[in-house]
Image (cartoon, grey):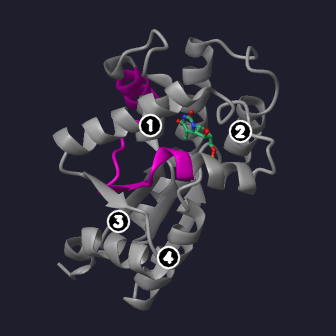
Amino acid sequence: MTQRGRFLSIEGGEGVGKSTQIAALAEAIRTAGHDVIVTREPGGTQGAEAIRQMLLGGTAERWLPRAEALLFAAARSDHVERLIEPALESGKWVISDRFIDSSRAYQGGGSGLSDADILTLHEIGSRGLMPDRTLILRIDPDEATRRASVRDHGKPDRIQAREADFHKGVDVAFVSYAEREPRVRLVNADGPPATVTSRLLAEISDLLVPE
Ligand code: TMP
């Protein structure tokens, strides 16, 4: 029987260098002998990418909080059922650029929806699938804003454009998950990229060991 693959999610605010680190992490896991699929949220499948366009484009008022949370959950449902689950079942490792903790932090905080509501939507949409490990990249918030603005040429998407206080709240939420849930690890994303990659690998070393 094929051993089920591992599922990693990488989280963090805007501009923390997630893409670079995900590519490096995938390469290191491949070198350790595993097949790796890299994907992203919202997105990863045709349907979920279509929902991504609806979610990230348009004006700030386009979606109210409940509809927004349902759309993220719908995108995730398609992604899990069509891509993530089949890959894990066939023994592949999956690295997702964002997953459920982004919905908890971005849609759950102060929008009228509780953490329990978001997790209920996840249960319905994706049978509550949780990553084996979640790595949250963190840097100083001012530096993150600067990097994100360079990356986006001053044109943030609908959600990136929210105020600094909103993004601070997202960071506070991420830290609180790491404090309460052993699955979730905070990783310092300051410093040379190779150093950050080593920190990420240290947080998954137990998973990389063959069972
Ligand atoms: P990114 O591709 O730059 O990571 O952008 C995705 C944006 O969508 C980012 O601002 C975070 C936001 N987001 C949510 O608000 N909820 C979610 O569940 C996910 C996956 C992303």
Q: From this view, report whether residue 51 is shown above or below residue 149.
A: above
Name the secondary structure under disc 3. Answer: loop
Between 79 and 24, the one lying in front of the other is: 24
Say which of marks 3 and 2 sits in front.
2
**Residue at 36% across / 61% down in the picture?**
188
Q: Answer yes or no: do the residues labelled 4 and 2 have beta carbons within 8 Å?
A: no
Instruction: Judge depth for marks 1 and 2 and give the one in front.
Output: 2
Viewer-nearest of labels 4 and 2?
4
Residue extending furthest toward the top: 112
Q: In whole angstroms, how far apart are the C-alphas of marks 1 and 3?
A: 17 Å
In what quadrant of the picture does the C terminus appear? bottom left
Q: Residues within 10 Å of mark 1 (few under 14, many from 20)?
A: many
How far, Cα to Cα, is label 4 from label 3? Answer: 23 Å
Q: Which residue is mark 2?
A: 52
In magenta, the rendered stretch is 118-143
Give the CA separation, mark 1 to mark 2. 17 Å
Amino acid type, callout 3: Arg
Type of the residue with mark 1 = Ser
Q: Nearer the viewer, residue 58 or 67?
A: 58
| Residue corresponding to mark 4 | 193
Q: Which residue is identified by label 1? A: 126
Q: Amino acid at mark 4?
A: Pro
Q: Which residue is mark 3?
A: 6
Whichever of callouts 4 and 2 sits on the residue coming sooner in the sequence is 2
Pointers 3 and 2 in contact (CB under 8 A)? no
On the question of residue 13 being in view, the answer is no
Residue 188 visible to the viewer: yes
Task: Determine the image quadrant of residue 48.
Answer: top right
Q: Earlier in the sequence, mark 4 or mark 3?
A: 3
Write down which quadrant ligand 1 falls in: top right
Q: Are marks 4 and 3 in contact (CB under 8 Å)?
A: no
